[in-house]
Image: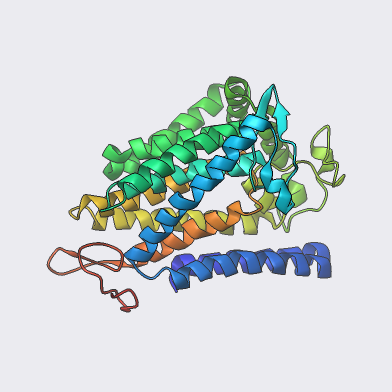
Amino acid sequence: MNTIDKAVIWWMVIAVITGTLLEKWDGFINRSGGVYSVLGSYFLFRFLIRDRDDLLAVYKIMAIIIVPLTILVILEKATGRNLFSILGGVPEVTQIREGRLRCQGPFAHPILMGTFAATSIPLFFSLRFFKGGKWFSIVGIICATFITFASASSGPATAYIYSIIALMAWPFRYNMRTIRWLILIAIVSLHMIMKAPVWFLLTKLGELIGGGGWHRAELIDQAIHHFNEWWLIGTTYTAHWMPYALAENPNSVDITSQYIYEGVNGGIIRLGAFIIVLILCFRALGKTNLKLKDQPLNMQVFSWSLGAALFAHILSFLSVMYFDQIIVFLYLLLSIISTFTTSIEPCPDNQVKSGLGNVTFPLKTDPFSI
């Protein structure tokens, strides 16, 4: 158990407590199911992924299974019919928006499929630096790129851009503190000089590449204006936030932000716990990057790719709420970060012991030795 593991557990404990206070027994049952999904997925991966070979196997398997997914998405793009509908859970006829087919494959929504593919780009990229991983990397990136744009959604397109930008920031990996401060200063400056709040840049982005940019920006604005309604333990009624509500749930607006979802369903405490999990992951990766500074390039890139993928996710959280099977890939990433960063420790001889690297394998508690 490390700090990230404990933070994930506390995040879920808070989810159950606030859900019970908010909706009593129904809330307890609902949140308990969510906890089963989160902790079950997260710790299953923590237990099963034991060494570097396991990690590389996970990436390679993802690169393999994305091939048949891509083939079926190509057929969906060509015919407008989703073959996954045979299995149920998704419509047979593909959605069309602004004259473009929005393929979704086996996912509950096109945005989720596209986001899964876009945030996988850094992981596939890192395979290129390991023996026997070149073709897995190339095939994975090509397939993920096609799936991203086959979803015809602005969220996955921007997540793809975020992934590329994060990978391109590699030369500045030891200056990230300065870059973070510069980004913060830029955001605050824009907020001060813009006529509208800075989050309405999402509207401009939507105008450039399509999508519901105004809805996402206005939702953030309304969440801030109605802070007093949800900050304590959340709220079950948000229909008055926007001019329209969900057809399937007239008490709620379409919450297209993971951050707002966390706040609405558990107040500022649950939202804070979720953000702490993300901060701890980035902090652990930052420390690991420094420990790997003089180590083989493949291990450095592997570590950086994890941060790049997480970076793409946290920005995607601004425009999409995660549900359906994409959550499994999110918890897989968090679990890999927890496993990988825990396995690295400096040695007296200025080398690095790693359960996942190609330097040496024994760990602090030696469960990764092979």
Residue 314 seen by the camera? no
Residue 257, position in %: x, y? 65, 43
Residue that appears at 57% across and 58% down: 328
Point out the image quarter for the C terminus: bottom left
Q: How many marks?
A: 0
Against 320, residue 283 (above or below) is below
272 vs 302, left or right, is: right
139 vs 89, left or right, is: left
16 vs 22, left or right, is: left
Against 252, residue 100 (above or below) is above
Residue that appears at 27% across and 55% down: 299
Residue 262, position in %: x, y? 66, 53
Report the colour scheme: rainbow
Residue placed most toward the observer, 159 or 219 = 159
Residue 97 seen by the camera? yes
Residue 211, position in %: x, y? 65, 28
Residue 215, position in %: x, y? 71, 32
Residue that appears at 57% across and 35% down: 74
Against 235, residue 163 (above or below) is above
Point out the image quarter for the N terminus: bottom left
Residue placed most toward the observer, 33 or 239 = 33
Residue placed most toward the observer, 310 or 92 = 92
Residue that appears at 44% across and 47% down: 309
Quarter of the rendering containing residue 220: top right
Considering every residue shown, the one lying at the far left of the view is 349
